[in-house]
Image (spheres, rainbow, N blue to C red):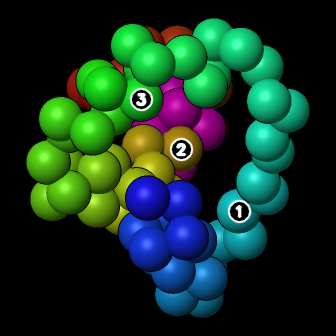
Amino acid sequence: MLQNVMLPVARASTRLRYPFHQDNDPKQTSNHIKTAWAQVPLYVLTYLIQSMPRRCQAVIDSRGFGTEY
């Protein structure tokens, strides 16, 4: 998932650079989490990744207060 989806999308972005952090925290590698992530459709993950610049800008514009997201 990371190699095939998230990293290519992050690398393709010319506007933002994405830091990647992986600390092997057990809650991030549990079977329940892996199963839940496997059930999320690829188009949903792609949309969320692509919408992050817009979402971040909304938070900046609202000075940290609520946004439509």
Q: Secondary structure at mark 2?
A: helix
Distance Cα–Cα, label 3 vs label 2: 26 Å
Residue 40 shows which numbered tag? Answer: none
Name the quadrant containing residue 58: top left
Q: Secondary structure at mark 3?
A: helix
- Residue pushed farthest front? 31
- Quickly name the residue at label 1: 18
Q: Residue at coordinates 43% horizontally, 58% vertically from top-left?
A: 1
Q: Residue at coordinates 55% horizontally, 70% vertically from top-left?
A: 3
Nearest to the eye among marks 3 and 1: give it: 3
Residue in the foreground of this view, choosing between 56 and 60 = 56
Quadrant, the C terminus: top left
- 29 relative position to 26: left or right: left
Task: Tell me the amino acid under the disc marked 2.
Answer: Cys
Instruction: Name the N-terminal-most of marks 2 and 1.
Output: 1
Distance Cα–Cα, label 2 vs label 1: 13 Å
- 41 relative position to 35: left or right: left
- Quickly name the residue at label 2: 56
The magenta region covers 57-62
Q: Is residue 21 above or below residue 13?
A: above
Residue 38 spot, x, y in % from top left: 27, 39
Distance Cα–Cα, label 3 vs label 1: 22 Å
- Quickly name the residue at label 3: 34
Q: Residue at coordinates 81% horizontally, 45% vertically from top-left?
A: 21
